[in-house]
């Protein structure tokens, strides 16, 4: 059994001004996407300035979509009881699936503005995302969020506030799978020309499978619990459409020509 690391969620504190590790992980995600995107911008006819604009739209999509998604999927009752709660993002509550929807809408707007095929752009964006996802899960771990179920595995650790029993460090599982593994797969596949839509399909499918698998060892949200059969969680239900959509995209991509600009 391991000990849960005692890391202060506040990374920087200057009087009343506080910067949380979780917020810094968003910075890590966007900076890494900016750096990697600039390296490959010319592949689809974008400039370095275009990458900055794309990330600006994506950031809006992440924040607005993530907050609305959390409100709709996890906090509808709280939102109904306190309509202004939706604006208090500093109280916590962001949904990956909502953020993904926001980024997809932002990508549609940017692709239309630049005259790009939509899946050419999403294929370009897909390998830029996993580092941010992995960093975000590390932020969850530091924030003592996403506790896992009880385990007897040697790397189990007591979760703060949940007693002495060792638990799966589910946030770290997601950091490795959704961050490191997903990045390596997408970056490797994207190194060579491929059919349009393949990378987008791989992203949806692999993320969906990784998230679905980790949900088996992650505790459900306390106010929702298990939705069916004593094991189905909201995360599973929201992830299934991603897996199906990703597989459909992969199948569709096999009939598409190689995107010459990639």
Image (tube, helix red, strand yellow):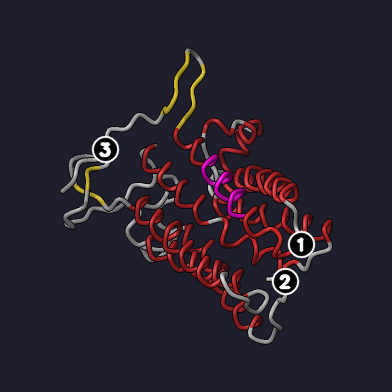
The secondary structure that most of the magenta stretch takes on is helix
Q: CA distance from mark 1 to mark 3?
A: 45 Å
Residue 83: name its quadrant: top right
Q: Position of residue 141 (x, y in %)?
A: 37, 43
Tell me the residue that label 3 is attached to.
5
Q: Which mark is residue 45?
A: 1
The quadrant of the picture occupied by the C terminus is bottom right
Mark 1 and mark 2 residues within 8 Å of each other at the beta carbon = yes
Magenta-highlighted residues: 26-37
Res. 130 in view: yes
Drawn side of residue 123 relative to residue 4, left or right: right
The x and y percentages for residue 74 are: 53, 48
Of residues 15 and 231, the one drawn nearer to the viewer in this rendering: 15
Q: Is residue 170 magenta?
A: no
- Number of marks present in the image shown: 3
Q: Earlier in the sequence, mark 1 or mark 3?
A: 3
From the viewer's side, name the closer residue of 160 and 43.
43
Query: Which sits earlier in the primary sequence, circle 2 or circle 3?
Result: 3
How far across and down, in percent of the image, does residue 241 sit?
57, 68
Neighbours of disc 2 within 10 Å: few (<14), some (14-19), many (20+) = few
Q: CA distance from mark 1 to mark 2?
A: 8 Å
Tag 2 residue: 261
Image location of residue 153, percent across then percent down: 18, 57
Please name which of the two marks, 2 or 3, marks the residue nearer to the observer: 2
- Residue at figure coordinates x 79%, y 65% from the top left: 116
Q: Would you say residue 72 is visible in this rendering?
A: no
- Residue at point 65% right, 63% down? 124
Q: Depth check: 164 or 171 in front? A: 171
């Amino acid at each position: 059994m391991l000990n849960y690391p005692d890391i202060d969620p506040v990374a920087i504190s200057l009087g009343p001004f506080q910067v949380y590790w979780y917020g810094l992980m968003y910075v890590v995600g966007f900076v890494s996407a900016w750096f990697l995107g600039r390296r490959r911008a010319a592949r689809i006819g974008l400039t370095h300035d275009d990458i900055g604009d794309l990330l600006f739209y994506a950031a809006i999509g992440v924040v607005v979509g993530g907050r609305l998604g959390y409100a709709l999927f996890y906090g509808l009752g709280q939102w109904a009881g306190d309509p202004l709660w939706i604006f208090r993002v500093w109280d916590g509550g962001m949904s990956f699936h909502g953020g993904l929807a926001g980024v997809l809408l932002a990508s549609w707007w940017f692709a239309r503005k630049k005259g790009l095929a939509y899946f050419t752009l999403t294929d370009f964006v897909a390998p830029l995302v996993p580092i941010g996802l992995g960093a975000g899960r590390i932020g969850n771990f530091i924030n003592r969020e996403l506790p896992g179920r009880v385990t007897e595995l040697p790397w189990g650790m007591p979760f703060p506030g949940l007693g002495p029993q060792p638990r799966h460090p589910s946030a770290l599982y997601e950091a490795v799978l959704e961050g490191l593994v997903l990045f390596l797969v997408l970056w490797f596949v994207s190194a060579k020309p491929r059919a349009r839509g393949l990378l987008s399909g791989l992203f949806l499918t692999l993320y969906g499978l990784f998230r679905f698998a980790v949900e088996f060892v992650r505790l459900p949200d306390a106010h929702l619990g298990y939705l069916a059969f004593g094991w189905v969680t909201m995360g599973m239900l929201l992830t299934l459409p991603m897996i199906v959509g990703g597989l459909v995209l992969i199948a569709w991509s096999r009939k598409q020509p190689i995107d010459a600009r990639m």
